[in-house]
Image (tube, rainbow, N blue to C red):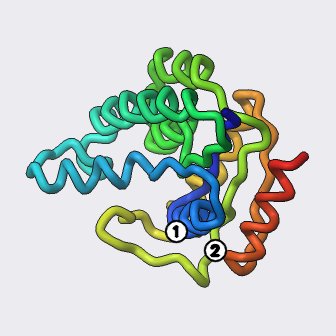
């Protein structure tokens, strides 16, 4: 049940890479925050990151813990589009306190090393209904994610800015370490 995280700032190609990894036979866990944004918007709720990041983080943590526990019961490699430490980085960038429960949840629901980190990539960055950050904000989040994962003891391996197929090959080689 090796569980790997693909993280990085918004718009860096994480979701595209995850879909490609699933097409070649790996298990994947969709980005929880995108699911929750769609659900909360459909409900007319104000619990979205741009209005209530603290409340949104609570929803995200609960869903990510459940996602991690479900993946832990499988035998195959699973790639996650973001991991629990991402929530910590988002709260820190927003200047919000990080409840100890988030750090405890990250420790209780471990991922494999290395964490695969997608760098900011202006040429592919675009906004959509769930990606509201500017490119500068995406860059700041990337730096916070790198610091957070490293502070929590993870090795960080930066994904190359290349084709999706080449990124899949890079990931395959990285998890074969």
Q: Position of residue 150 (x, y in %)?
A: 75, 36
Answer left or right for 12 relative to 44: right
- Classify 122 as above or below 105: below
> Image quadrant of residue 149?
top right
**Is there a contact, CB below 8 Å, between mark 1 and mark 2?**
yes
| Residue 61 visible | yes
Residue 147 - label: none
* Residue name at image x 26 percent, y 41 percent: 52
Neighbourhood count class around disc 1 (C-alpha, 10 Å): few under 14, some 14–19, many 20 upward: many
| Residue 138 visible | no
* Residue picked out by circle 1: 11
The one nearer the camera, 23 or 86, is 23
Neighbourhood count class around disc 2 (C-alpha, 10 Å): few under 14, some 14–19, many 20 upward: some
Answer left or right for 31 relative to 50: right
Q: Position of residue 76 (x, y in %)?
A: 65, 41
Residue 121 - label: 2
User: Mark 1 or 2 closer to N-term?
Assistant: 1
Q: Position of residue 9 (x, y in %)?
A: 57, 58
Q: Quadrant of the N terminus?
A: top right
Q: Residue furthest bottom?
A: 123
The one nearer the camera, 129 or 18, is 18
Q: Position of residue 20 (x, y in %)?
A: 60, 68
- Classify 100 as above or below 47: above
* Residue name at image x 48 percent, y 43 percent: 90
* Residue name at image x 55 percent, y 27 percent: 73
């Amino acid at each position: 049940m090796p569980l790997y995280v693909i993280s990085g700032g918004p718009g860096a190609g994480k979701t595209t890479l995850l879909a490609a990894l699933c097409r070649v036979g790996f298990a994947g866990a969709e980005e929880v925050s995108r699911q929750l944004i769609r659900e909360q918007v459909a409900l007319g709720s104000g619990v979205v990151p741009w209005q209530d990041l603290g409340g949104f983080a609570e929803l995200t943590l609960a869903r990510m813990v459940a996602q991690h526990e479900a993946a832990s019961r499988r035998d195959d490699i699973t790639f996650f589009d973001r991991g629990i430490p991402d929530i910590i980085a988002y709260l820190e960038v927003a200047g919000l306190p990080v409840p100890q429960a988030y750090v405890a949840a990250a420790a209780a629901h471990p991922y494999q090393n290395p964490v695969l980190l997608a760098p900011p990539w202006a040429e592919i960055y675009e906004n959509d209904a769930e990606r509201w950050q500017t490119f500068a904000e995406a860059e700041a989040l990337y730096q916070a994610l790198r610091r957070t994962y490293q502070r929590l003891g993870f090795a960080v391996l930066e994904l190359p800015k290349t084709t999706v197929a080449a990124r899949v090959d890079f990931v395959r080689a990285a998890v074969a370490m």
